[in-house]
Image (cartoon, rainbow, N blue to C red):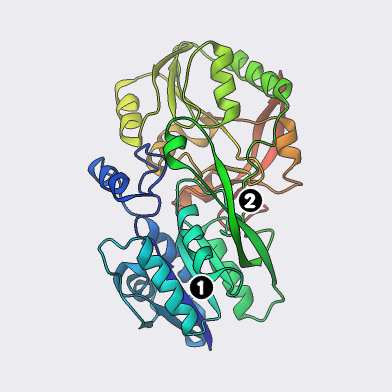
Amino acid sequence: MFKLGLIINPCAGLGGSVGLKGSDGDAIRTEAIARGAEPRALQRMERALQVIANFREQIEIFCFAGDMGESSAHASGFTAHVVGAAQQQPSGAQDTCAAATVLMQHNVDLILFAGGDGTARLIADVVGTSQPVLGVPCGVKMHSGVYANAPEAAGEILKQLLTGSLVNIVERDVKDIDEDAFRNGQVRARFYGTLLVPEDSQFLQQVKNAGTERDELAQLDVAQGMIEQLQPDTLYLVGPGSTTHLFLQELGVDGSLLGVDVLLNNELIATDVSAAQIITHLDQFSGPVKMIITAIGGQGHILGRGNQQFTPAILRRIGKNNIHIIAARGKILALNGRPLLVDTNDPELDVAFGGYRPVIVGYREAIMYPVGYSVEGEH
């Protein structure tokens, strides 16, 4: 029997769609819920477990009660050994640490956890490199290299273990940022430690490569190339990132570095908007709407990491053919042939957004590059 430990941070990712850029701290979680945020960590864990549903007879699941693991295990058709319970509702950091401690005491073969970089930090504090773990990505900011590309990708890695495939176990970096600084437009990423993770280059996301793209001339070329393509009387939703921020600066407007901004006729009409505010703009605007997004350095994600304000409902309204992807050539080359990635929290939409897409990599210069969806990284 494969002994699988589950840990879920039910609040992971709450702040994303409502523009809070994180979910750390009780006050932020309360604010996120007040703004209409909906939890998604349980559902994403269930998506991972569904991939290994046919192996139920080979798996024993150990977890804490309720939303920390038991609920998702039962929803996926698994029985679970409940080995503890959260001391507060919703569960907090101390509950995550307690769960990791108890699961290690039960000698599980691997801990599968759902959360963001803050959750990875907590587990690294308890587990270190003494216990294999694997993350199901649910957070807003995902700098650490311990997460699968998508929930289904985590399931595929587990499937390889269950079928006896030779899977490398490697140490991967855990990184996190200062969320308060992040909300003020400053990225302060720190290395916090390592975790032991089963590695598969197709399914495991890379460590976010923060700030390695320093060729400002290349980024300026990209910005000018995008500016030349702007159309009048068209509403543009501009995603977060240094490349998109430089584009706005070159246009002569003061947009947000880490939020979503709304642009019309070369003027900002709203900055740092939430998903609900985006929908209001879409409802009020009768003309064409387009998006401008960039890729996360090192990882290659274009949707689902740091820009969860672009919800599946919004993406469907806009359509993939109305999305501009901009990235300096060096950022694309650094992927070493790996596709750009989407993880929208809607598997059907991920499939629809896959394929070869144009990427603006310079002034009047674009390339066709693969965009991967879910676990089908080569499509």
Furthest residue toward left: 34
Q: Where is residue 339 drawn, in percent x and y?
A: 67, 47
| Residue at image point 53% right, 50% down | 351
Relative depth, front residue between 221 and 174: 174
Look at the picture and state if 314 lies above or below 338.
above
Three-letter amino acid code at the position of disc 1: Ile
Secondary structure beneath label 2 = loop
The residue wearing badge 1 is 111
Mark 1: secondary structure:
strand
Q: How far apart, in angstroms, are the residues tagged by discs 1 and 2?
A: 20 Å
The image shows residue 104, relative to residue 286, as above or below, that is below
The reply, left or right, for residue 282 in relation to residue 338 is left
Q: Which mark is residue 223?
A: none
Q: Is residue 261 left or right of residue 242?
A: left
Q: Position of residue 274 (x, y in %)?
A: 35, 34
Q: Give the labeled residue for mark 2.
A: 207
Q: Earlier in the sequence, mark 1 or mark 2?
A: 1
- Residue 184 seen by the camera: yes
Question: Exactly how many numbered labels are in the figure?
Answer: 2
Residue 265, horizontal then vertical, whole percent = 46, 11
How would you rate the neighbour count of disc 2 (Cα within 10 Å): few for under 14, some for 14-19, many for 20 or more?
many
Residue 114, how many percent across, how many down?
A: 45, 62
